[in-house]
Each structure stands twice: as structure tokens, then as C-alpha cells.
Image: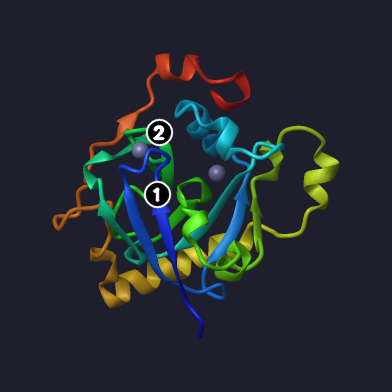
Amino acid sequence: MKTFDIPVRCSCASVRGVLRAVSPSRVVRAVCYCDDCQAFAHHLGQADTVLDNYGGTAIFQVSPGHLTITEGAQHLACVRLGDRNLLRWYAACCGTPVGNTPGSHKFHFLGVIHACLDLDALDVPVHKALGPVRSRAFRKFALGDRTITNALPGSIWPFVFGGLRRMLRGRLTGAYRSSPFFDDAGAPVSAPHRLTPEDRSRLPPYASA
Ligand SMILES: [Zn+2]
Ligand SMILES: [Zn+2]
């Protein structure tokens, strides 16, 4: 099976890393239109670079153990939109989003946000390394003309089943202990910041529910 190493870099280059041994048949490449993903991009001030014309975030699912942070790990920070919501990781130096994980390291999956990929340093076209978009999630939150987004191919299920498969495999093999986002005791490497009402007041109305 052909695999690729994909360089990761925040926009100010303080955080660098690599996603190792990614194969297009294993990753689930997706676009997520959910209001939480939109809120996260706006909270970071990155909506222009992260969201597509319909409010979608380009994301792909891997196991967290594929990601090694080689520089600037101290800049990793995370927010969560509610007590049970995903941890949304970003590089605090410049606000580049990195990816989403469950709140517990025992649930071993990571949605990597394309904005942190160093595509200039990738020596193949991105679709070779990641495959085609196989999943589109939460279209009911898409912005603009729904007849366009509803006609795009891909359902939520590859994303859901991919997450379940990764969580199960992570538990069975013990791989869940290997993640750049959690320490050896299973605590997040940076304390999650729960969005405050004031944070939310700065979001656009459609993303602040
Ligand atoms: Zn940075
Ligand atoms: Zn989402």
C-alpha cells in the first residue's frame, strides 16, 4: 500500500510537524459544514482561509498517532464549544487550526484541517496523498444555495464509520496512548478553553448557537 508523509506547518511556521504513513485508501477525506466547525474558524479569525464558499471545512480523518509535532508543540492550544464537544486544536502563535479530537484520548481519532498542511512541501498533488472527498457532513448547516451543496457527492457515513473503526482499533491495540494532543496520563497537553458568551458574541449569528 502506497503511503505518504504530509508536512504540517502553521502559517507563521512556529509549529511544524508531519503526518506519517498516510494512505489515500485509509484516510477519510471530508467536508464538514457543521455550525461548530464554522464557529471555530470564525473564533480563530480564520474563516477566510478555512471555510469554502458554503461554510464547509476541508478535513480528513486519521488516527492521532500519525501526527508528530516536530517544532513548537508548546503553541498547541484548544477550545471546545460545550463540555461534551470535540477539542478543537490550533496553533496559538498565529491561530492556524490543526484538527479536532474527542475530549478523551481513549477515543482515538483526529480530524485534520487542511489549513495546517504544508502543501508546497508535499511532493505530490494533494488528491494523490489523500484521495477524493468521500464524505460530506452536516449539509443542513451549509451556507448559500443548498441545491448546490445537496447535489455534491458524499454522505456522512464514511466519516462516522471511519471514526468508530479508529476508536475501536485504538482501544484494542493500545494505540490510543500515542497522541500529540494528550500526555502520558491522558490529559490534554493544553487545558481546553470553553468558549464564553463574550467569545460567542463575536461570532456571526449563524455560527454562534
Ligand atoms: Zn503559528
Ligand atoms: Zn464540523
Q: In which quarter of the image is the C terminus?
A: top right
Disc 1 crowd rating (10 Å Cα; few below 14, some 14-19, many 20+) is: many
Residue indicated by mark 1: 9
Disc 2 crowd rating (10 Å Cα; few below 14, some 14-19, many 20+) is: many
Which element is circle 2 on? loop
- Judge whether residue 127 can be spotted in this image: yes
- For ligand 1, give the image quadrant: top left
Q: What residue type is labelled 2?
A: Gly
Residue indicated by mark 2: 95
Residue 32 as seen in the image, left or right of residue 97: right
**For this rendering, which residue is in front, 140 or 39?**
39
Asked if 166 appears above or below 204 in the picture, the reply is: below
Q: What residue type is labelled 1?
A: Arg
The residues tagged by marks 2 and 1 sit, at their Cα atoms, a distance apart of: 12 Å
Q: Earlier in the sequence, mark 2 or mark 1?
A: 1
Percent x, y for residue 54? 71, 37
| Residue at 63% in and 24% down | 206
| Residue at 25% in and 65% down | 178
Asked if 1 appears above or below 189 in the picture, the reply is: below
Asked if 50 appears above or below 7 in the picture, the reply is: above
Between tags 2 and 1, which lies in front? 1
Percent x, y for residue 179? 28, 59
**For this rendering, which residue is in front, 12 or 204?**
12
Colouring mode (rainbow / by chain / secondary structure / one colour): rainbow
Q: For the view shown, which residue lies furthest in the right direction?
A: 147
Residue 48 as seen in the image, left or right of residue 155: left
- Disc 2 residue: CB within 8 Å of ligand 1: yes
Percent x, y for residue 142? 70, 38
- Judge whether residue 209 can be spotted in this image: no
| Residue at 60% in and 19% down | 205
Snapshot quadrant of residue 96: top left
Residue 174 as seen in the image, left or right of residue 125: left
